[in-house]
Amino acid sequence: MSDSAKELIHVYFMPGMAANPTIFEFVKLPEDQFKIHWLQWLIPTRDESIKGYSQRIIENIHHENIVLIGVSFGGVIVQEIAKYIKVRRLIIISSIKCRDELPKKMKFASKTGVYKLLPVGLLDYVDQLEKVAVNDYLKKRAKLYQQYLSVRDKYYLSWAIQNMVNWDCSTVNPEIIHIHGDKDVVFPIKYISDAIVIEGGTHVMIINRFRWFNNYLPDLILKGKEAIKNNPKIIKI
């Protein structure tokens, strides 16, 4: 292995709930500095804790001092992973850092247990959405769902929803970098603090705002929060 190869920074991406890692297909980092790796969802074992699950994901990480980037529930998982391995940088996108950032409806679902009643089998009908869509916008949205939401195992979905709404985070990593859209309807910006805010960014901005990430992720990875101070185009609240 050449010296230049040894110096590459390995960046591991974890997709959002039920999503496959092709949500990152348009995210590009300079190949002379970074090597991108995609992590995938595993099917949980019966009654598996989020700790045990995260430790199983670690088995698919084959480098040291890595960068971990997670989207949505994947952001929760990378925070759990970072408790057990050393990371160079921890970045979450369209996610939460602690229970306080959960929207009220998710806190209610956690308190009442209503999340257990959610019809996780609805994803079985994703393939049919395109056929019944009545206009171009709906057809495009249906095609996106079909392409990216491929993890449809019902036990996985029930497990993921349960662990999302019941996530117990005692402390927030002070070095975490949080990137969030001001139009995110899953985790509304009004509940989010200490984040880089993407104007017009939605919950799926990793797909449709990939150019922002291609422009700014390298600097955020290399410099961390210092990159925020030095670049006026990066907005932070």
Image: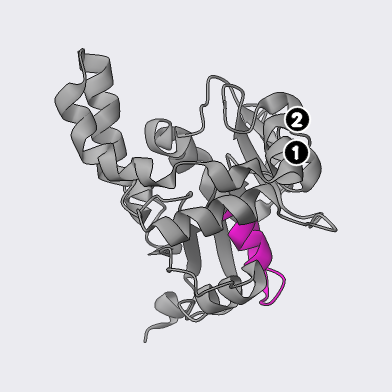
Q: Residue 166, how many percent across, how many down?
A: 71, 52
Residue 88 counted in the magenta span: yes
Choose between 104 and 114: the one closer to the eye: 114
Is residue 119 positioned above or below 141 on the image? below
The residue wearing badge 2 is: 191
Q: Residue at x 27, y 38 (%)?
A: 126
What residue type is disc 2 on?
Tyr
Q: Residue at x 36, y 40 (%)?
A: 122
Q: Residue furthest left?
A: 131
Classify mark 2: residues with Cα within 10 Å, few (<14), some (14-19) or many (20+). Answer: few
Which of marks 2 and 1 precedes in the sequence?
A: 1
Q: Dot 1 lies on which element?
A: helix
Range of the magenta residues? 74-90
Residue 126 counted in the magenta span: no
Q: Residue at x 77, y 57 (%)?
A: 168
Per the rendering, the mark at residue 101 is 1
Q: Residue 236, how many percent across, how many down?
A: 72, 31
